[in-house]
Amino acid sequence: GNSVTQMEGPVTLSEEAFLTINCTYTATGYPSLFWYVQYPGEGLQLLLKATKADDKGSNKGFEATYRKETTSFHLEKGSVQVSDSAVYFCALSASAGGTSYGKLTFGQGTILTVHP
Amino acid sequence: GAVVSQHPSRVICKSGTSVKIECRSLDFQATTMFWYRQFPKQSLMLMATSNEGSKATYEQGVEKDKFLINHASLTLSTLTVTSAHPEDSSFYICSARDGRQGIDQPQHFGDGTRLSIL
């Protein structure tokens, strides 16, 4: 079946530090890949997405590249801010066919805390 | 962008009460909605997939008689936690997919409902 594995947190950084959150996946076919962010007490917001190999998703300074050869979709940001403190989820959406069609499979989430 | 409204945001009630949570897509037609449960500091667990006009599909281990899902229109799905008990306390989140878009497009999430059973 499909699965997503994220690096374990929590991750604690100082403001303006470089961020990497690793994400690898297992899936049949050609899934779409997403990063979602969850602020305390809220639902999930889409951060970025990539739908095919070598696509780069980007938003608000965050980037992630769909690497089919390494089945990875690592999240990066060059300079984090205190306001980036949240929980980040990597997810995949199964491709056509089967009972998993259209469902999202989430990683376990990574808590990021950024200090001033 | 697409907006999903979830209501209420917080519920506190006594054990044995049934609680209904609504999930509405405000500016698109959601042929499919999903209900998740999230425990503290954990990931989202898919409970069921709700398709407009048909019965929900429940994930393994989720009690369908406990968690009643109705998707009567293209913009509304409801989750009713029947005879809730303290172990049902959790954060429940819904998401919706625009029926006109492919599965490479993201699901849109509500802000969640914090359910606390005393």
Image (cartoon, coloured by chain):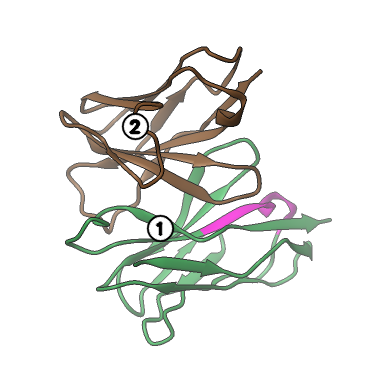
Magenta residue check for A88:
yes
Residue B41 lies, in percent from the top left, at: 65, 48
Q: Is residue A47 above or below residue B31?
A: below
Q: What numbered label is drawn on residue A105?
A: 1
Q: Mark 1 lies on which chain?
A: A
Q: What stretch is highlighted in magenta?
A: A81-89
The answer as to whether the residues below labels 1 and 2 share one chain is no
User: Which one is in front, B40 or B31?
Assistant: B40
Residue A65 lies, in percent from the top left, at: 44, 75
User: Which one is in front, A42 or B64?
Assistant: B64
The residue to which callout 2 is attached is: B64
Q: Is residue A64 above or below residue B78?
A: below
Q: What numbered label is drawn on residue A14?
A: none
SS at mark 2 in the image: loop
The C terminus of chain B lies in quadrant: top right
Magenta residue check for A90:
no
Residue B38 lies, in percent from the top left, at: 54, 42
Instruction: Please tell me which residue is depicted at 57% across the width and 22% down the height of the picture.
Output: B85
Q: Quadrant of residue B77?
A: top left
Residue B30 lies, in percent from the top left, at: 25, 35
Q: Estimate the spatial distance between the alpha carbons at disc 1 and disc 2, rounded to whole Å.
A: 21 Å
- How many neighbours does mark 1 have within 10 angstroms: few (below 14), some (14-19), or many (20 or more)? many
